[in-house]
Image (cartoon, rainbow, N blue to C red):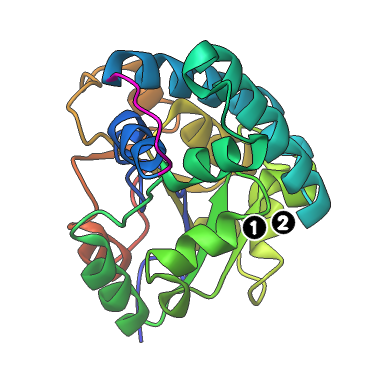
């Protein structure tokens, strides 16, 4: 089948997966354990945890390292919640924290992935994430629609380093760079694509990026989309997106 691209690389969070606000889920998880906290305090605790996680997730490339990171993150949550959880065992604070994270697929994603597979393109997720990326994709019901996934923690490199994209391309048969499309929602996604010499789509779900933003205009320029619904048409189109 003739198509514009043979491989589509897809970011995870913000592109395929949403993050439900974790604060209310933390309130509910703690309430189930007999602890009452307000949503404002829970929100602050989760923001502190996520800030720490983002700075350290690339080191969680093995199950053991992930367990250690989660213990450290739970300690931050306990510190932020203070006296409210002082009597709660650390293992229960950690369990409540993990219960608070929900990563559902965006509504259009399953149908889009099925349509992309129908074009014959290979689909690989490439994400700045810890080793649990595969679990998150499985929980969202997406793993069976993909040809593979690779995280920054597993490879030791993170976007915008193009080496992460090269690692993802190693999971599928070799193709020329002009047959590869990178789809993501952040500047590192577009910058990694440019550094790797492949085309890019910036997914702008909240309309935060102006049409004349240098991130889009390049060179080379990047395609700009509000979600993934137009992706199958782009991939199945008559030729690569102009650079």
* Vertical arrangement, residue 182 with respect to residue 225, above or below: below
Q: Position of residue 60 (x, y in %)?
A: 75, 43
Magenta highlight on residue 71:
no
Question: Which residue is nearer to you in this view: 180 or 85?
Answer: 85
Q: Secondary structure at mark 2?
A: helix
Can you give x and y, in whole percent of width and height, for residue 133 in the image?
Answer: 57, 55
Q: Contact (CB < 8 A) between labels 2 and 1? A: yes
84 left or right of 1 in image: right
From mark 2 to mark 1, how far is it between C-alphas?
7 Å
Q: Which residue is mark 2?
A: 167
Residue beneath the point at 40% across and 70% down: 142
Image quarter for residue 3? bottom left
Residue 136's label in the rendered image is none
The answer to whether residue 43 is seen in the rendering is yes
What residue do we see at 52% from left, 13% from top?
83
Where is residue 8 shown, x and y percent of the image?
A: 45, 62
Question: Are there few (<14), some (14-19), or many (20+) residues within 10 Å of tag 2?
Answer: some
Residue at label 1?
A: 150
Label tally: 2
Q: Position of residue 157 (x, y in %)?
A: 75, 39
Query: How many neighbours does mark 1 have within 10 angstroms: few (below 14), some (14-19), or many (20 or more)?
Result: many
Viewport quadrant of the C terminus: top left
Along the line of sight, the residue nearer the viewer: 3 or 17: 17
Q: Which residues are magenta?
A: 33-38
């Amino acid at each position: 089948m003739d198509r514009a691209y043979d491989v589509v690389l897809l970011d995870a969070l913000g592109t395929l997966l949403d993050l439900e606000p974790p604060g209310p889920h933390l309130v509910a998880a703690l309430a189930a354990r007999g602890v009452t906290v307000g949503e404002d305090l829970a929100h602050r605790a989760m923001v502190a945890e996520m800030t720490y996680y983002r700075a350290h997730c690339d080191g969680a490339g093995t199950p053991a390292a992930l367990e250690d990171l989660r213990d450290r993150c739970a300690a931050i949550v306990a510190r932020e919640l203070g006296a409210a959880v002082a009597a709660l065992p650390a293992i229960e604070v950690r369990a409540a924290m993990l219960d608070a994270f929900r990563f559902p697929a965006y509504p259009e994603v399953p149908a889009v992935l099925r349509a992309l597979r129908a074009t014959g393109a290979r689909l690989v997720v490439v994400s700045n994430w810890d080793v649990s990326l595969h679990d998150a994709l499985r929980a969202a019901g997406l793993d069976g629609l993909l040809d593979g996934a690779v995280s920054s923690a597993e490879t030791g490199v993170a976007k915008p380093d193009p080496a992460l994209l090269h690692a993802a391309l190693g999971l599928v048969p070799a193709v020329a760079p002009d047959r590869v499309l990178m789809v993501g929602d952040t500047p590192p996604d577009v910058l990694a694509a440019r550094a790797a010499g492949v085309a890019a789509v910036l997914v702008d779900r909240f309309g935060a990026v102006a049409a004349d933003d240098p991130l889009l205009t390049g060179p080379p320029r990047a395609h700009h989309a509000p979600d993934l619904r137009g992706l199958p048409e782009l991939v199945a189109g008559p030729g690569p997106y102009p650079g």
